[in-house]
Amino acid sequence: MTTMHPMARPATADSERVVAGLEEVGAWFGESLPMGTVVATHATGALGYRAGPSLVVVDVFGRTDEHIARDGEQRGFVGARFVARDYDYVLTTRVPSVAVEDATYTREQQCGINPAYAGLFEVASFRRTAGPYWVTVYVRSALSGHLIDRLDAHPDYEYVSCR
């Protein structure tokens, strides 16, 4: 019945587009960031898989982190997923150098930052060279120049300052 619903095909196409974008961002991170870099994100599936084993990908919603899942702030269900979070634990114990709130592409540059990351991180905005797509990445302030240079060196992404 669901496959016959008029919204089934568009919803599937949207989902496939999001997953493809997560795969691209994950591959970009895996090819660009130094081995051992800790990346905090809300989308660990395709992004983490494509980033590969040289990066540590932490799901800030606790789907892949036992501490967050058991002891984090229980947020309940978001969509079809149960969510917990513990930004303090992520920032002080897991110590990410890179964070990406929503690794899907946007149609315009986003320069805002989640208050949980403000002060420790800077916004780094990248334009996908193929098409009108943008990705917003938070980079740890102390490492920002180095990490932005590494991410910008990839031929598929161009750093565009938010200033």
Image (cartoon, rainbow, N blue to C red):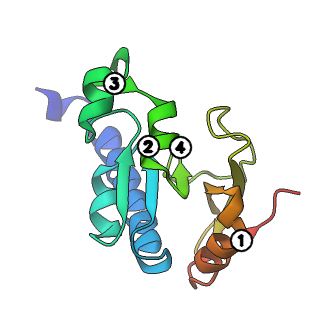
Residue at left 34%, top 54%? Answer: 19
Q: Which residue is mark 4?
A: 101
Residue at left 44%, top 28%? Answer: 86
Amino acid type for the residue under numbered disc 4: Glu
Amino acid type for the residue under numbered disc 3: Val
Above or below, comparing residue 33 to residue 93 in the picture: below
Q: Which residue is mark 2?
A: 93
Residue at left 16%, top 28%? Answer: 2
Q: Give the number of the mark in front: 2 or 3.
A: 2
Mark 4 or mark 3: whose residue is earlier in sequence: 3
Image quadrant in which the N terminus is located:
top left
Q: Are marks 2 and 1 in contact (CB under 8 Å)?
A: no
Q: Which residue is mark 3?
A: 83
> Badge 4: how crowded within 10 Å, few (<14), some, or many (20+)?
some
Closest to the observer: 103 or 17? Answer: 103
Q: Give the number of the mark in front: 3 or 1.
A: 3
Q: Which residue is mark 1?
A: 159
Q: Position of residue 56 (x, y in %)?
A: 35, 60
- In terms of secondary structure, where does tag 4 sit? loop
- In terms of secondary structure, where does tag 1 sit? strand
- In terms of secondary structure, where does tag 2 sit? helix
Mark 2 or mark 3: whose residue is earlier in sequence: 3
Q: Give the number of the mark in front: 2 or 4.
A: 2
